[in-house]
């Protein structure tokens, strides 16, 4: 087994199917879409790959989730969107396996160190994690600005 994972955003790339069949990557990150390719992967191109579906969210939808006062409800709403997409796409099985094993949504919900060249985080960065951390578990220092050391 190799350790090479595939990232598939566009499924019409020439020789993609040949590469999948030859490499049989253990992990595939797959942008939502092209049910036919997913079925081909499960039927034989790379049936044992763990496939992570990437659910696209535009910036306003991401902001709404991140700024929600009820993150659990926001998460349930996203799960309902995924489960209701394209007539059961998220629950379809081929040879006993789901087309997609797991789903991801937000990508880098909090900006990383490169976003703060002066090593000073801004108010948005300090505010965003608060609703996503239980107040019972959060220490008084959990959301204090931190200095980034690279």
Image (spheres, rainbow, N blue to C red):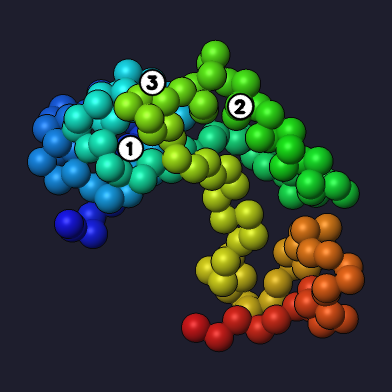
Q: Is residue 82 above or below residue 117?
A: above
Separation of residues labelled 2 and 3 (CA atoms): 14 Å
Q: Residue furthest front?
A: 96
- Residue 98 in the image: x percent, y percent? 43, 32
Q: Earlier in the sequence, mark 2 or mark 1?
A: 1
* Residue 88 placement, left or right of 126: left
In depth, the one of 142 and 121 nearer the eye is: 142
The quadrant holding residue 15 is top left
Residue 63 visible to the viewer: yes
Separation of residues labelled 1 and 3 (CA atoms): 13 Å
- Which residue is found at the position 89% from the left and 71% from the top? 136
Separation of residues labelled 2 and 1 (CA atoms): 21 Å
In depth, the one of 121 and 105 nearer the eye is: 105
Dot label at residue 83: 2
Residue for badge 1: 8
The quadrant holding residue 84 is top right
Residue 127 visible to the viewer: no
Q: Earlier in the sequence, mark 2 or mark 3?
A: 3
- Which residue is found at the position 20% from the left and 30% from the top? 44
| SS at circle 2 | helix
- Which residue is found at the position 85% from the left and 47% from the top? 70
């Amino acid at each position: 087994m190799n350790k090479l994972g595939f990232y598939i955003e566009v499924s019409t790339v020439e020789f993609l199917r040949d590469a999948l069949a030859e490499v049989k990557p253990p992990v595939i990150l797959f942008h939502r879409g092209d049910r036919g390719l997913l079925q081909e992967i499960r039927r034989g191109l790379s049936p044992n790959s763990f496939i992570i579906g990437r659910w696209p969210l535009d910036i306003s939808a991401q902001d709404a989730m991140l700024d929600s006062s009820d993150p659990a409800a926001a998460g349930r709403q996203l799960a309902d969107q995924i489960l209701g997409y394209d007539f059961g796409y998220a629950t379809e099985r081929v040879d006993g396996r789901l087309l997609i094993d797991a789903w991801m949504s937000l990508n880098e919900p909090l900006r990383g160190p490169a976003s703060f060249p002066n090593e000073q985080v801004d108010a948005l960065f300090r505010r965003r994690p608060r609703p996503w951390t239980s107040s019972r578990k959060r220490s008084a220092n959990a959301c204090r600005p931190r200095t980034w050391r690279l």
